Image: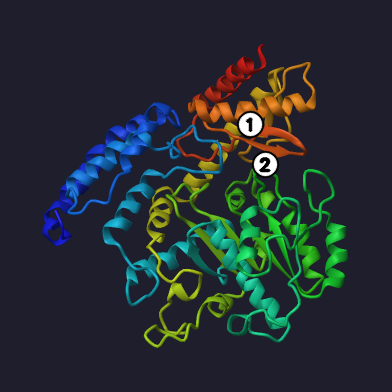
């Protein structure tokens, strides 16, 4: 086919093909296994030599639809519990199609006033949703990892400023290492952000008072008393059992010292939406920076995250001023979001967030948070009632940490059994729920955040775990 200029008339038909495939796929999604191994061979159909002339728009799109609708991992469906992965609400999914249709370069006001205004609006709405001060600066990012990177880059700038150095311009040479403290709940994404910032992945000092990783506040107070300017990472939500650091109490300690408080609220920040769970996020409004994901509990498509910073001007100082004469200055009248975060080229990821918040409002998203907590409690109750299942942690929000534990097996035998059970669950594909190690024991830790998930899906998870566990243990 050659030059796509000659295929311009195919654009609408190609989109129509996707539209026609969407209804049967979405209708089937709630009933599909997460992964169907019988379609794995279709992945080979993606391969082959690079076409010389190409097969044409409609052939290529038809092939991708044929392969994708069968071979995809159905992580947007209601049975995917392995990681903290939401689906995409109807409004968010449609808006993501609009995002691709309009294809806005969202970094500069000049290139898209539409995308810029949408981002400004959704950042304000999100601050209202989470109870953050309206004066906070903010920027949308591709993920919580990038949101952590953004908040911690501002923390690094502030730390350098306290040492009389502009680290954006001059780097870290000659400075001491930046002290970083957290609980045992610190997530790999925060470590990755510190790695990218030159602070070091393993430089975080974890101050824990037990083997679950709970923060030792007295130790934190002592360390901050001698460390000089430092950064403290509080964790609003922990991935193994769903527990939260006591952010308000940590903020009290930080306030007594010359420290920066960053909150990693990748999924837990959404606990603020319900009176049932809002106490878990108390104190987040006192943080210097806050990070969260949109493609988790907000249920918008990948990739979506957001970062908020108390001193709004730090975003521009940490990420702006590239000395490129063709780019607008960071203090221009209209905001240029590529000066406020790590990306220069940015898609209009505000559109799905705007659509889902406009469509369902505060009440709809609160209802989703509470429904997922109810489903987690249903699973927790089923675990407590079954003699072959053992709960390893209280149910807090949506993570349920448990293991298959029939009587008569030693701890090493239970660890081995649950490792094999987790692997078998993923191979089986009816539901997805892999393993972790919590307090030294191998466990399952299903996370319930998909807007489609119902009680039937939870009951299927329990039945599947028991069926596979009984087979593997010979019961």
* Closer to the camera in the image, 95 or 227: 227
Label 1 packing within 10 angstroms: few (<14), some (14-19), many (20+): some
Label 2 packing within 10 angstroms: few (<14), some (14-19), many (20+): many
Where is residue 279? Give x, y as percent: 69, 50
Circle 2 residue: 240
- Residue 214 visible at all: yes
> Which residue is found at the position 83% from the left and 54% from the top?
216
Left or right position of 71 against 312:
left
In this rendering, is residue 100 above or below 460?
A: below
**Tag shown at residue 453:** none
Where is residue 259? Give x, y as percent: 75, 71
> Which residue is found at the position 40% from the left and 69% from the top?
345
What SS does tag 2 mark? loop
* Closer to the camera in the image, 292 or 81: 81
Q: CA distance from mark 1 to mark 2?
A: 16 Å
Circle 1 residue: 377
Where is residue 74? Give x, y as percent: 42, 36
Left or right position of 394 against 317:
right
Q: Please identify the residue farthest to the top as the structure is shown.
A: 475
Instruction: State which tag comes first along the sequence, 1 or 2.
Output: 2
Left or right position of 5 against 119:
left
Where is residue 344? Give x, y as percent: 43, 71
- Residue 132 visible at all: no
The C terminus - image quarter: top right
Left or right position of 467 against 232:
left
């Amino acid at each position: 086919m050659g030059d796509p200029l000659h295929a311009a008339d195919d654009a609408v038909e190609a989109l129509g093909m996707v539209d026609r495939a969407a209804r049967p796929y979405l209708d089937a999604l709630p009933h599909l296994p997460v992964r169907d191994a019988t379609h794995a061979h279709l992945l080979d159909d993606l391969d082959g030599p690079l076409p010389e002339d190409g097969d044409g728009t409609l052939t290529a799109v038809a092939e991708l639809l044929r392969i994708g609708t069968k071979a995809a991992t159905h992580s947007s469906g209601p049975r995917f519990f392995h990681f903290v992965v939401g689906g995409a609400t109807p409004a968010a999914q449609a808006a993501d199609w609009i995002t691709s249709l309009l294809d806005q370069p969202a970094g500069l006001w000049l290139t898209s006033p539409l995308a810029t205004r949408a981002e400004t609006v959704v950042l304000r709405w999100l601050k209202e949703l989470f109870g953050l001060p309206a004066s906070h600066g903010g920027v949308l990012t591709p993920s919580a990892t990038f949101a952590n990177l953004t908040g911690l880059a501002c923390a690094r700038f502030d730390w350098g400023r306290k040492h009389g150095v502009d680290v954006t311009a001059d780097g870290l040479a000659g400075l001491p290492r930046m002290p970083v403290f957290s609980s045992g709940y610190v997530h790999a994404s925060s470590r990755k952000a510190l790695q990218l910032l030159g602070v070091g992945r393993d430089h975080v000092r974890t101050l824990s008072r037990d083997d679950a990783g709970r923060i030792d506040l007295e130790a934190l107070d002592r360390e901050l008393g001698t460390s000089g300017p430092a950064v403290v990472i509080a964790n609003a939500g922990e991935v193994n059992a769903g527990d939260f650091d006591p952010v308000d109490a940590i903020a009290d300690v930080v306030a007594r010292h010359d420290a920066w408080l960053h909150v990693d609220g990748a999924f837990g920040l959404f606990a603020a939406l319900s009176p049932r769970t809002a106490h878990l996020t108390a104190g987040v409004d006192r943080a210097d920076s806050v990070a969260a994901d949109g493609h988790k509990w907000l249920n918008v498509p990948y990739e979506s995250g957001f970062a908020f910073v108390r001193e709004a001007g730090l975003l521009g100082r940490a990420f702006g001023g590239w000395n490129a004469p063709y780019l607008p200055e960071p203090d221009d009248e209209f905001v240029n979001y590529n000066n406020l975060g790590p990306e220069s080229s940015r898609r209009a990821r505000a559109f799905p967030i705007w659509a889902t918040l406009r469509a369902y409002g505060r009440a709809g998203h609160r209802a989703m948070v509470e429904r997922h907590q109810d489903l987690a409690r249903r699973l927790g109750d089923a675990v407590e009632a079954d003699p072959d299942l053992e709960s390893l942690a209280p149910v807090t929000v949506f993570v349920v940490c448990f293991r298959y534990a029939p009587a008569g097996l030693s701890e090493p035998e239970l660890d081995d059994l649950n490792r094999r059970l987790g692997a078998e669950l993923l191979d089986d594909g009816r539901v997805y729920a892999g393993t972790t190690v919590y307090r030294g024991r191998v466990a399952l830790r299903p996370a319930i955040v998909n807007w489609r998930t119902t009680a039937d899906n939870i009951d299927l998870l329990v039945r599947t775990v028991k069926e596979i566990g009984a087979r593997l243990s010979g019961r």
